Amino acid sequence: MKKKTVFIEGAISPNFISESIAKHQSKHTIGGHNIFLGQVRADVIDAKTVAAIDFTAYEDMALEQIAEIREKAFETYDLTCMHIYHSLGKIKAGEICFFVFVSSKHSKEVYAATEYLVNTIKKNVPIFGKEIFEDDTHQWKTNIK
Amino acid sequence: MKKKTVFIEGAISPNFISESIAKHQSKHTIGGHNIFLGQVRADVIDAKTVAAIDFTAYEDMALEQIAEIREKAFETYDLTCMHIYHSLGKIKAGEICFFVFVSSKHSKEVYAATEYLVNTIKKNVPIFGKEIFEDDTHQWKTNIK
Amino acid sequence: MITIKYFGMLAEHTQCSEEQLEFKPLTLSELVQDLKVKYQLNPASFHVALNHKLVQDCEDITLQLQDEIALLPPFAGG
Amino acid sequence: MITIKYFGMLAEHTQCSEEQLEFKPLTLSELVQDLKVKYQLNPASFHVALNHKLVQDCEDITLQLQDEIALLPPFAGG
């Protein structure tokens, strides 16, 4: 299974996203793109506000899981391209930490494909997040379904 | 009903998209964005290849329809922001002509909201497209469900 | 006066995107019938909008002064 | 040697992200039990991965030379 680049050190910049979009303009069979962006929320928990999330991952296992999820998505949905990026390190509230980008000939399948990818990655990929509050205390984030 | 800017003369640039994303980084209650991008396909029809689509619209009616669709989407889905842009004029194959951008506290509702917006706009908004072939002949595009 | 607008393939066919007609107290269906004859339009190929709203049944609507009527071919946005 | 990796709140708790242990022919569940005792871990708070695959039932698995075991707290990607 081919392992594509997934992890990016630091936040995913709007500029990185626009460059990814621009790269697809030479692919003239694509009719629709769907993009999901995860942005760090300044959640208030017990009167303390989240200032950033520090992400770590079990990278080898995560890349294998994501390669499997990619293959499954290509089998299930009629997609031309699929790109998945996740940040590592400290990502501040308002910054983007997760970028899922799916392209297809027609628009019909892209929404379900994106939803499948986002939910399966949240559930099955070993990525860990330390929510750092403004007062420098922290708690560990958990993806509860 | 407030009418927001929807129509853009010419293609929607990746840069315009990244600027829209960047503007949302100050909104710290947003946890997920979903973006749909419609890209002009170089379809081959009876051995002729589409080189561009020339879009026109019944603008006054289109803006009223889109304002209604926006209100309905805000009622139906738990959204923080919603932006809709469509190109007018000649958009070349590979260029982006349609940009739907939805943001929410959580990721759960953004996929269905985007799909609803894209499908309802295609079906109910008076936008017309002349598919121009490489030999400069043309045919009129029709959104068939 | 009333205003008639044509879009897309209909504007191409009529070679006209907008025209003003003197007001007469016709029903909308009578007006549309007149336009069909004038431009040899295929009625299956367009919808009618009155003041920015699609009209399903033109029979019962009587034109008002300054109405805006539009003949709309199939939509192709997205 | 076998390798044990700790992540997230578990690495914080053990104050260790990776350690090498001398190979012994234990089952995976025996190894995990040893680690629980060593670090006073709460078994409800983590999953076990063996060579990059989540393991549901550690009972029947006997460790092999150069296995990589990871203790994984709840995932938080996205």
Image (cartoon, coloured by chain):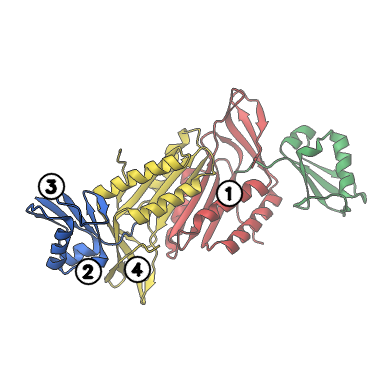
Chain colours: A red, B yellow, C blue, D green
The answer to which image quadrant residue A65 occupies is bottom right
Eye-nearest disc, 1 or 4: 1
Q: Secondary structure at mark 2?
A: loop
- Where in the figure is residue D58, as x and y percent of width and height? 84, 49
Q: CA distance from mark 3 to mark 1?
A: 52 Å
**Which kind of residue does numbered mark 1 sit on?**
Val
Residue at the (30%, 41%) spot, across then down: B3
Residue at the (42%, 59%) spot, across then down: A25
Q: Secondary structure at mark 4?
A: strand
Q: Residues within 10 Å of mark 1 (few under 14, many from 20)?
A: many
Q: Is residue C48 visible?
A: yes
Q: Which residue is mark 1?
A: A118
Q: Which residue is mark 3?
A: C66
Q: Residues within 10 Å of mark 4 (few under 14, many from 20)?
A: many
Q: Which residue is mark 2?
A: C42
Q: Is residue B89 visible?
A: no
Q: State whether discs 1 and 4 lie on one chain.
A: no
- Where in the figure is residue A145, as x and y percent of width and height? 64, 42
The chain identifier of the residue carrying mark 3 reads C
Q: CA distance from mark 2 to mark 1?
A: 48 Å
Callouts 2 and 3 close, C-beta under 8 Å: no
Q: Secondary structure at mark 3?
A: loop
Is A139 placed above or below B49 here?
A: above
